[in-house]
Amino acid sequence: MIVSPLSVLKLVLIVLAALVLQVSGLTQMTVLGGNADLVPLVVAAIAFLAGSVPGAVTGFATGLLLDLALGQTVGAASLVLTTVGYAVGSYREVRDPAHALAPIAYAAAATAGYGFGLAAVSFMLGIEASVSVLVLRETILTILLNMLLALPVFWLLRRVLGGSLLADPIARGRHQRTRATGPLGLRGLEVGR
């Protein structure tokens, strides 16, 4: 990601919009007993498009603002979202996906990591929370709903961040990643002279 004042402003506005939508609207809308969680989806999209360091920074800031907005234990969501942002970004940097459906898998992994990670951190910190089969069912429904929202959210964020990205992982196809080599693939080695 090209760091400039405009790209930082875009990230701040994206995070604030996601938090406002999540806190004010999406928590009240239930589908089949579960609700979509826009926060890990946006952090995963930014990490997928911009890389591991912008993903971790965005995850930390988003988690901190979420904890402050909801009055939760400060730092729990920050810790988990920082890890989710860094993990998604670093995995994308290593694997370099070019498939158009890759955001669905990244959204599912990020949402599962956020849900189960937040539960583990809450348990370790001794935060009072209810544990039952219904929580597991709601987490699975949240993962499925975020998988449905993944393509539109990733597409929208790719459009918004378009000029700030070094390389768009989805727009680049598999045929563009190959390098020109010699007749036997030994270019530059000068074998047989």
Image: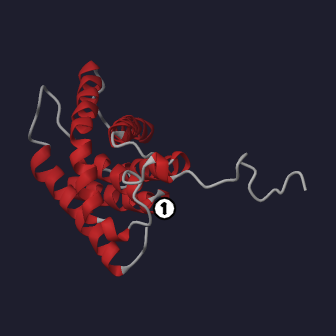
**Which residue is at a point 11% across and 52% down the rendered structure image?**
24
Question: Where is residue 43 shown, x and y percent of the image?
Answer: 34, 53
Q: Is residue 42 above or below residue 120?
A: below
Which amino acid type corresponds to the residue marked 1 in the rendered image?
A: Val
Closest to the observer, 128 or 152: 152
Q: Quadrant of the C terminus?
A: bottom right
Query: Residue beneath label 1, please?
Result: 53
Please identify the quarter of the rendering in which residue 117 is found. Answer: top left
**Which residue is at a point 11% across and 31% down the rendered structure image?**
31
* Residue 37 visible in the shown view: no
Closest to the observer, 61 or 178: 178
Q: Is residue 26 above or below residue 158?
A: above
Disc 1: CA contacts within 10 A as few (<14), some (14-19) or many (>=20): some
Question: Where is residue 131 shown, x and y percent of the image?
Answer: 30, 25
Q: Quadrant of the N terminus?
A: bottom left
**Which residue is at a point 48% across and 53% down the rendered structure image?**
176
* Residue 93 visible in the shown view: yes
